[in-house]
Image (cartoon, rainbow, N blue to C red):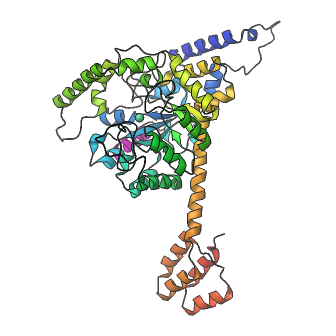
């Protein structure tokens, strides 16, 4: 049986769709209406919907929240019931490391990563870990993917970056609201007390290159404008903004200017619109940036932290005082759904409809536009886009198609870069001859040849020379097979 809310949603959407296409109702003499009319619901249900940012892992880890629990929307935006109602196909769970965890960034990140895997293990019939978004959808399962929020999580260590890729992380925002040791953030770029880098340091640029090589998507949400333009210059693959909106419409420094949007078009990337009221509605943003009110909120949060210290000395996390922040945010009226749709529409017009998507920031924000209480309300976005004249094909791109294209391109770029590196690393005849004469063991030699390949043909003359140096047959065999093009 369908849950009643899904049925209600179906009825509402069907009614609206019919109201939009009155001719579809007038069928004469019992002739059935044309099948496959594009109603908002049929479009929405047929889409592979990808949302690129939700902060739910903190709830898994710090609240012991189970995705199978049906939570009131005031407490959480995402659970398996809401996912089903909203037909959410894939979610990028944010591995957000609060800067307060200094000294333990990687540990905190690994704990959050583990919490996502734990959820997938608890609900194997409904969800699965995924490292690319397509296959779980074919199995009718919700795909859980992961992105790191805040480059400080790699602790300035390229090996940790590679480790995070190995455990399944598929994007990383170069910064969060804090400038780190190698990239500037939009969150503090105006703060003279913070050491900045005019964008990125050389190490930061290498991080971008290594992400390209690994196949980890470069995410420019949160970064400063200088970091943004440098990342686009360096990246050989399309980049994403996993949760950023338009600065032209809502003047927030972490939103993207029209010039940045056009740069995204050239890069082939995609901007996933953030749903947070203060990023999509200028009235809300102005009301919520009243310095007196912010002061009062910050004082309340500080008082809470002082009153609830952890016995092990670990920081009080955002999740613990989130109810305070939500209560504070509720004093400002929620913007209309129109504001969110305006952002999608604006980015689609400036960057192109192939370069926009959804990056809700569910479970990470204290206010959402009217009508969007949780992931269950995603069909309302489809409905609104249809009403604005977007076609089925365009809507499918916005709901997930654009992101999937970028993910495939990032994977293809990684494959190419990895092959190129192997080419340039290929062993020369002199390398092999030296190792043979130095009595490097046959097993080791075979491994190295397999890893790097060779850049020479095994002619009869070279074979004879290696034989003379007592090269093993297995080594000669590996050389014969190891020629790089
Ligand atoms: Zn964020």
The percent position of residue 361, horizontal first and vertical second, equals: 44, 30
The answer to whether residue 139 shows anywhere in this view is no
Q: Residue at x 49, y 83 (%)?
A: 435
Q: Position of residue 403 (x, y in %)?
A: 58, 38
Could you tell me which residue is drawn at 61 percent across and 21 percent down?
385
Q: Nearer the viewer, residue 429 or 363?
A: 429
Q: Main secondary structure of the magenta part?
A: helix
In percent of width and height, residue 273 lies at: 51, 30
Q: Magenta stretch?
A: 110-124
Split into quadrants, the picture shows ligand 1 in the one at: top left
Number of numbered markers: 0
Q: Is residue 481 above or below residue 146?
A: below
Query: 172 and 129: which one is in front?
Result: 172
Q: Quadrant of the C terminus?
A: bottom right
Q: Tell whether position 189 is magenta.
A: no
Depicted 168 relative to depicted 417: above or below: above
Dividing the picture into quadrants, the one containing residue 381 is: top right
Displayed quadrant of residue 366: top left
Instruction: Please name the residue shown 59% across and 12% down the image.
Output: 11
Asked if residue 186 shows in the view, the reply is: yes
Tell me if 409 is positioned left or right of 211 in this view: right
Pick whichever, 123 or 41, lies toward us.
Answer: 41
> What percent of the width, then of the height, locates residue 311?
16, 38
Q: Residue at x 53, y 17 (%)?
A: 338
- Figure check: 459 above or below 269: below
In the displayed image of the protein, which residue is found farthest to the right? 29
């Amino acid at each position: 049986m369908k849950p009643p809310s899904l049925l209600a949603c179906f009825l509402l959407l069907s009614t609206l769709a019919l109201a939009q296409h009155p001719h579809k109702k007038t069928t004469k003499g019992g002739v059935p209406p044309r099948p496959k009319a594009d109603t908002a619901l049929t479009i929405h249900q047929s889409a592979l919907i990808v949302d690129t940012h939700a902060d739910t892992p903190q709830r898994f880890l710090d609240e012991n929240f189970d995705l199978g629990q049906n939570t009131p929307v005031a407490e959480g935006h995402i659970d398996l019931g809401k996912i089903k109602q909203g037909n959410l196909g894939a979610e990028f769970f944010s591995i957000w490391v609060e800067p307060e965890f200094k000294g333990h960034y990687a540990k905190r990140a690994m704990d959050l990563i583990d919490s996502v895997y734990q959820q997938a293990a608890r609900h194997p019939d409904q969800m699965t870990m995924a490292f690319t978004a397509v296959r779980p959808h074919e199995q009718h399962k919700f795909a859980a993917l992961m992105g790191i929020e805040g480059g400080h999580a790699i602790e300035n260590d390229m090996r940790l970056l590679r480790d995070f890729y190995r455990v399944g992380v598929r994007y990383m925002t170069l910064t969060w609201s804090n400038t780190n040791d190698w990239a500037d953030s939009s969150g503090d770029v105006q703060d003279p007390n913070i050491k900045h880098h005019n964008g990125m340091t050389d190490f930061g640029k290498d991080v971008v290159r290594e992400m390209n090589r690994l196949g980890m998507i470069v995410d420019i949400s949160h970064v400063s404008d200088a970091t943004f333009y440098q990342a686009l210059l360096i990246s050989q693959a399309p980049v994403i903004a996993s949760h950023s909106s338009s600065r032209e419409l809502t003047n927030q420094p972490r939103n993207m200017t029209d010039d940045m949007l056009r740069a995204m078009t050239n890069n082939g990337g995609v901007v996933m619109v953030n749903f947070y009221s203060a990023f999509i509605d200028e009235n809300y943003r102005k009301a919520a940036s009243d310095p007196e009110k912010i002061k009062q909120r910050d004082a309340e949060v500080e008082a809470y932290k002082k009153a609830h210290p952890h016995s092990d000395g670990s920081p009080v996390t955002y999740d613990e005082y989130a109810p305070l922040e939500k209560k504070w945010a509720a004093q400002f009226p929620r913007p209309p759904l129109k504001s969110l749709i305006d952002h999608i529409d604006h980015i689609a017009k400036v960057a192109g409809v192939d370069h926009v998507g959804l990056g809700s920031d569910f479970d990470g924000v204290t206010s959402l536009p009217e009508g969007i209480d949780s992931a269950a309300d995603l069909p309302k976005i489809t409905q609104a886009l249809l009403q604005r004249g977007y076609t089925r094909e365009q809507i499918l791109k916005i709901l997930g198609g654009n992101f999937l294209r970028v993910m495939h391109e990032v994977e293809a770029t990684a494959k190419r870069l990895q092959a190129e590196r192997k080419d340039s690393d290929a062993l020369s005849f002199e390398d092999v001859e030296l190792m043979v004469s130095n009595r490097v063991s046959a097993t080791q030699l075979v491994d190295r040849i397999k890893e790097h390949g060779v850049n020479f043909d095994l002619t009869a003359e070279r074979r004879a020379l290696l034989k003379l140096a007592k090269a093993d047959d297995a080594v000669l065999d590996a050389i014969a097979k190891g020629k790089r093009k």
